């Protein structure tokens, strides 16, 4: 009788062991816990594996958990509201946070001269940075206000490229540079100046 009980217990333990090991493997690759404790660019401790890449189409775990979606997106106004003026001031130190990055990018923007501008014009570009703060390739146009003449679009795209070129390379801290490398960044430029003489341009 005791021998039968011992054999049954041994078989039960053998059946439980594989499922426990599988559960342990699932816990090791489950990204949910990191949603509550995201990595910090100031944290040297291991957290979420940092092997994701825009060139990697396979499954991976995100290296950052910022609340900005898959892309880092921001809007840059030609004339910012008074209560947001601080967000358009270039940081006087190496960029260490996403807020620093956004402030630096906002401060770079120089819209076209009024005589070549169009009131309400919007244009979006997408690009990525290297760890060194240099840009990977040229910004790619992703959106422009519909019905705008080609020469106006070219004027704004040239202004965007010139503004970014004048600011680069950005000076990242080691942590932020590593976290941003290859990550898509989308900027929407909005010309909200009062350009009454040009507001009726076709």
Image (tube, rainbow, N blue to C red):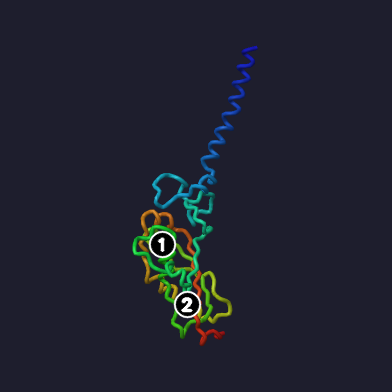
Estimate the x, y position of residue 9 in percent, counting from the top left: 61, 20
Outermost top residue: 1
Q: Which image quadrant for residue 109?
A: bottom left
Say what secondary structure mark 2 lies in.
Answer: helix
Image quadrant where one finds the C terminus = bottom right
Q: Determine whether, in the image, residue 44 is placed left or right of residue 122.
A: left
**Labels 1 and 2: the sequence-earlier one:** 1
Tell me the CA gap for discs 1 and 2. Answer: 25 Å
Outermost left residue: 93
Outermost bottom residue: 197
Which residue corresponds to the image point at 40% horizontal and 68% vertical from the top-left? 89
Up-down: is 89 above or below 43? below
How many labels, in total?
2
Q: Determine whether, in the image, residue 185 is placed left or right of residue 91.
A: right
Say what secondary structure mark 1 lies in.
Answer: helix
Outermost front residue: 83
**From where the camera sits, is residue 103 visible?**
yes
Which residue corresponds to the image point at 35% horizontal and 60% vertical from the top-left? 94
Which residue corresponds to the image point at 58% horizontal and 25% vertical from the top-left? 14
Residue pointed to by mark 2: 156
Residue nearer the viewer, 80 or 180: 80
Which residue corresponds to the image point at 49% horizontal and 57% vertical from the top-left? 54
Up-down: is 155 above or below 105? below
Image quadrant where one finds the N terminus = top right
Estimate the x, y position of residue 69 in percent, counting from the top left: 53, 58
Estimate the x, y position of residue 173 in percent, counting from the top left: 36, 57
* Circle nearer the viewer, 1 or 2: 1
Residue pointed to by mark 1: 100
Up-down: is 179 above or below 7? below
């Amino acid at each position: 009788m005791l021998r039968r009980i011992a054999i049954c217990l041994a078989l039960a333990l053998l059946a439980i062991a594989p499922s426990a090991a599988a559960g342990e493997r699932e816990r090791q690759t489950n990204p949910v816990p990191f949603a509550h404790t995201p990595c910090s660019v100031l944290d040297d401790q291991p957290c979420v594996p940092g092997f994701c890449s825009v060139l990697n189409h396979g499954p991976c775990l995100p290296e950052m958990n910022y609340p900005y979606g898959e892309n880092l997106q921001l809007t840059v106004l030609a004339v910012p509201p008074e209560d947001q003026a601080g967000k358009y001031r270039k940081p006087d130190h190496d960029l260490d946070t996403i807020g620093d990055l956004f402030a630096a990018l906002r401060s770079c923007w120089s819209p076209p001269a009024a005589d070549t501008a169009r009131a309400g014009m919007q244009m979006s570009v997408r690009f990525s940075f290297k760890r060194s703060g240099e840009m990977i390739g040229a910004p790619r146009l992703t959106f422009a206000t519909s019905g705008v003449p080609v020469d106006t679009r070219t004027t704004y795209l040239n202004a965007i490229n010139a503004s970014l070129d004048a600011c680069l390379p950005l000076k990242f801290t080691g942590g932020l540079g590593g976290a941003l490398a290859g990550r898509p960044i989308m900027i929407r430029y909005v010309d909200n100046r009062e350009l009454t003489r040009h507001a009726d341009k076709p």
